[in-house]
Image: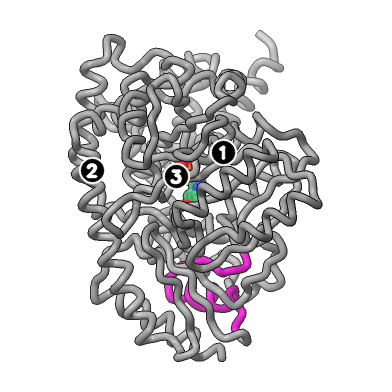
Amino acid sequence: MSFTPTITQDFLYSQIADRIEKQIEQNVLKSGDKLLSVRSLSKEQGISISTAYTAYVQLENKGLIEARPKSGYYVKFSSNHIPTLTSSKKSIDSIENVSVDDMIAIIYKNITEEGILKLSVATPSIELIPAAKLNKSMMEAIRKSPHSCISYEDIQGNLLLRKQIAKYCFSWGGNINEDDVVTTQGCMEALVFCLKAVTEPGDTVAIENPTYFGIFNVMKSLGLKVLEIPLNPVTGLDLEYLETAIEKIEVKACLFVPSFSNPMGCCMPDDRKKQLVNLLGTKNIPLIEDDIYGAMYFGKTRPKTCKSFDKKGIVMLCSSVSKSLAPGYRVGWVIPGKFKAKIINIKLMHTVSSATPTQAAIGHFFETGRYDLHMRNLRKALHSQCLKYIQAINKFFPDDTKISQPQGGYVLWIEMNKKINAFDVFKDALKQNISISPGQIFSTDASFSNYIRISFGIPYSDALENSLKILGDIVKKRI
Ligand SMILES: Cc1ncc(COP(=O)(O)O)c(C=O)c1O
């Protein structure tokens, strides 16, 4: 018998009870959730059965959990049940003088919030996705796999998926086989691998201006400098500017989105893509081609890729199914040309292999022809949505508004009166539960301050039209 162990025991059960209480407070444990049995809790935490039991009794006495006969302990209380009288959220009005990074963080935060119309997100809304067929492909792929997709996948990537990607490349003028493809976790990972393969921290990489904010986040994280090349709203990259710039500055790589750039939506004509590849070929500068929107074309044929003009293996084509099918699956790929061995090595060091079930499911979805059918429907839907959005913006926004006329992709780039600060429009819109992307986040120096980007990924409806009207009124009030 001793005095000390008793104190330790008391302390222990209180500690366990406090930790469970915190989980309830933070909604990690919700009303109705079953708790571990006393025996399991004791085993899991390495405590005695009586300590585990006493912890539960303490929580029960506080009214946080309840014992159900022959069933065990359940969470009784949830912070969700207490009406929120005052919101602790920082008012959107108080967000002033924010940096580009802060703006991006605020926008990302709203991406998963319920009740907000997300015109800021360049992905198809769930109504446009054949979710049931995709689920079927997932089930069938797991069933067909000898190891139920549980084991590590081949480092280069799932063979069926690579075969299907190789087959699909025929549509953009590609003549490749499964050995030329390396799979990744989304397009973003493909871009990171390519940059790592051809640059060192401190090197300069040419990118488009404006460009997708994720691209300069990656540049920053890899310690790279950026050289911003202007875009023509219709023909894309200013090749003459690039040619002059690479004479003066040592550029280690280029990272462009030649087909339906984000946010401008422009598409380089095939002959300019060829010119670009020839130019970079003579200088031996690798081109990382982000082709994530290439398959979302509105015309009769898919635009060619820079990769299709690449004779020297300097183009690394990156893409994913994030815009066409399932951003959450994180299935992407790179066709790395002469950098293949380096890319596989980087992948091995980074992630070993990509997730097995999602790669297998997408491989199956392609193989069964479901992808082709889905893409035909998606392209039609996006084209019609794009035209309707443009019409509505023309109707509801001030007369001096200029709107891009994309021939593919997901986004409209809108130029407003110079007096308007796009971040103010963003804040006003968020108060009305509408999220848009302010132009400032698409360049390193927060220029494009009188531009906004709107995605037309959500099907058109009366409610949507009303939201575009609200947005137009917000812009009008800001002049
Ligand atoms: C041009 C561009 N590249 C890459 C990505 C990211 O792709 P993923 O989600 O497949 O990583 C996006 C997403 O918006 C994008 O617009």
Colour basis: one colour
Circle 3 crowding by C-alpha within 10 Å: few under 14, some 14–19, many from 20: many
> Is residue 121 rendered to the left or right of residue 223?
left
Q: Mark 3 points at which residue?
A: 305
Total numbered circles:
3
In 3D space, how far apart are the residues under numbered discs 2 and 3 (Cα atoms)?
Answer: 29 Å
Q: Which of marks 2 and 3 is nearer the N terminus?
A: 2
Q: Which of marks 1 and 3 is nearer the N terminus?
A: 1
Start-end of magenta stretch: 420-440
Q: Position of residue 263 (x, y in %)?
A: 51, 62
At a point 48% along the width and 84% down the height, the residue shown is: 401
| Pointer 2 with pointer 3, Cβ within 8 A | no
| Mark 3 residue element | loop
| Mark 1 residue element | helix
Q: Mark 1 points at which residue?
A: 191
At a point 23% along the width and 35% down the height, the residue shown is: 135
